[in-house]
Image (cartoon, rainbow, N blue to C red):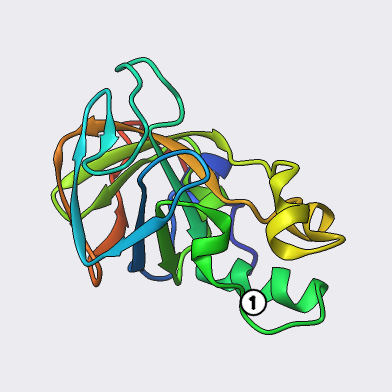
Amino acid sequence: MFSEPTPLKELMSHFPQAGEVIWIGLRTATRKEVNVVEETVARIGTGLEGDRYKGNADSKRQVTLIQAEHLAAVGSYLGRGIINPILLRRNIVVHGINLLALKDHRILIGDAVLEMTGLCHPCSRMEEVLGEGGYNAMRGHGGITARVVQEGAIRVGDKVLIEKMPWKCES
């Protein structure tokens, strides 16, 4: 009558649907404009082509991603509508998948493969661009940071998929 509990590692590999890239922004320089583009190329060590980030292959912040659903949540906390992602200066906005659930998974987006490296916490600049309370509105909703592990093109409309993990789940 009762089934055995599903092992946690197996539960953490189940996603109800693929996500989708709905916006890409490239930061030209610190405090300078964000270029909204339809596609870019992810490069190992330098992140997205056209973005100001210039790191190394070991850097944990080559690409930043945020959930579209969080743009609405932050707007709600501020008594406004959906926040324009240009203000937040993240690289990729995705819809339909919980980014926090991607920990320990490789993320397939277009031809590229990313690996989550941590949370993208808000900075004090959120008060400047979102107004008073912007920092606190963003807490827990800033998205994630990722490293490029396989180079490739990323386009608006690409699916966000999870690479199956090599572990064997036991029943």
Q: Left or right: where does residue 109 sit relative to residue 66? A: left
The quadrant holding residue 64 is: top left
Q: Residue at x 44, y 71 (%)?
A: 95
* Viewer-closest of 46 and 30: 30
* Viewer-closest of 67 and 50: 50
Please say if 103 is above or below 161: above
Residue 155: where, in percent of width, then height?
Answer: 20, 62
* Viewer-closest of 30 and 37: 30
Q: Left or right: where does residue 122 sit relative to residue 26? A: right
Residue 131: where, in percent of width, then height?
Answer: 79, 64
Please say if 112 is above or below 84: above
- Residue at the far bottom: name it: 81
Q: Residue at x 57, y 56 (%)?
A: 88
Amino acid type, residue under disc 1 in the picture:
Ala
Residue 152: where, in percent of width, then height?
Answer: 13, 43
Q: Residue at x 63, y 51 (%)?
A: 142
The quadrant holding residue 122 is: top right
Q: Tell me the crowding category of disc 1: few under 14, some 14 to 19, or many 20 or more residues within 10 angstroms, Cα based.
A: some
Residue bearing mark 1: 72
The quadrant holding residue 81 is: bottom right
Please say if 145 is above or below 25: above
SS for tag 1?
helix
Q: Quadrant of the N terminus?
A: bottom right
Residue 12: where, in percent of width, then height?
Answer: 51, 48
Q: Residue at x 75, y 42 (%)?
A: 124
Q: Left or right: where does residue 149 sit relative to residue 152? A: right
Q: Number of marks in the image?
A: 1
Q: Left or right: where does residue 47 sit relative to residue 112? A: right
